[in-house]
Amino acid sequence: MAIDTTLRSNAGALTGTGTAVATPARPVAARSVDPVDTKVDSKDSAVAARPTQLRSSQGTGAVGGELQGQVARAQQALDYLDQVAGQLESLKGELSAKLSSSRTQQRSSSQHIESATRQLTHTLAARKSTAGGGVDANLNFDGQPAQQRFRIRSLDIDSLQQNAPQTLAFSVAGAGGPAMSATITPDQSSGEAARAIDRALAPLGVHASLDRNGGLVFSTAESNWPAVKDSVAVSGRGRVATEEVPPDLAPQQWTGGNADALRQSLREVVQALERVRRSQDAASNALSAASAQLTEVTTPPPEVELAADDFASAAKNTNYDSLLALTSALVGVSRERVLALLGLR
């Protein structure tokens, strides 16, 4: 009985590239080993295994790296958004109850509204440490690290276009300079000018765009904000002052007032709740997509299952041909290599 003694590689279980099975819901980093060469001399039989990172089938990075970060970010975002959604629902109920209650009941409702508002304010304040880094100050989630939005004082589209043509060179934390420059011309639209500035700043980890009012607004990853906020320089202006764009949510203003104020607060709570629902859907989709990638990465191809079955069948026989095939397949496999392979599971 002839047995194919070559270990075929696959993207999942035990492969020639040393990839190991990972559990989709809880991905972990893994070690890998060199491919087992079944045609080596005895002097090569004690080759030690080298630890490497488990790589995806697309070869775009380690499962323990980028993909694991996506999973963790989505999972934590879902937990945080569920908490915020529950608190917004509670506050929505309290505001609705106060609008429909009698004057005597309104005193009790006011206390409940204040309590619900304090709880929500506390949760929002803890966002950076509890939301996994993927939910921004406005409770948006898009699968990427949360962004900090800010403005540069005295740098706005209207003044730039009024003084056109001009060329602006940017630097952030000492990096950049003349190479990172944007030219503003009189015939540019506001959007074109913003895109020119964005192209200049993108290599520095900063982006520029127009807000819904047509104003120039900048953004960078929240984790990068401490290094950016006091280190932006513009040619001809030197170090410029930056200021954070405050979030749209203002729960401290939802505590009460007259009927009109209560209705406005209720509208804002409902809008915030709708935004949270959209973010929950986005986080859920991101988690599903990452899990699907993990499943693809860790599922062995059919030929590996067949090879394993053939090997198991041969191991059950005690005739000479079977023992010869098994011995040939195990040439060059040292105890250290077997232990390294078992350690991957």
Image (cartoon, rainbow, N blue to C red):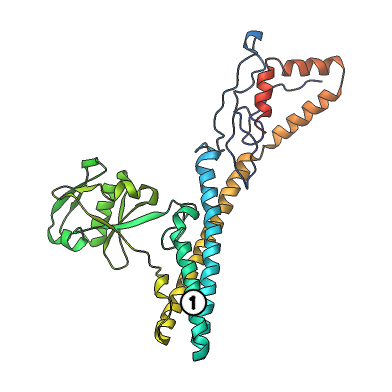
Q: Is residue 306 left or right of residue 222?
A: right
Rendered position, 59 above or below 115: above
In the rendered image, which residue does mark 1 sit on?
113
Q: Percent from the top left, x then y, of residue 126? A: 46, 58
Q: Which residue is at 34% across, 50% downward?
A: 225
Q: Which residue is at 65% across, 9% downward?
A: 41
Q: Amino acid at mark 1?
A: Ile
Quadrant of the snapshot with the C terminus: top right
Q: Residue 228 versus residue 342: which sits nearer the camera?
A: 228
Quadrant of the snapshot with the N terminus: top right
Rendered position, 318 above or below 245: above
The crowding category of the residue bearing disc 1, from other C-alpha atoms within 10 Å (few below 14, some 14 to 19, many at least 20), is many
Q: Is residue 144 visible?
A: yes
Q: Percent from the top left, x then y, of residue 200? A: 26, 47
Q: Is residue 101 visible?
A: no
Rendered position, 57 above or below 275: above
Rendered position, 304 above or below 139: above
Q: Which residue is at 48% across, 62% downward?
A: 123
Q: Percent from the top left, x then y, of residue 220? A: 35, 51
Q: Percent from the top left, x then y, of residue 140? A: 45, 61
Q: Residue 333's quadrant in the figure?
A: top right
Label 1: state its secondary structure. Answer: helix
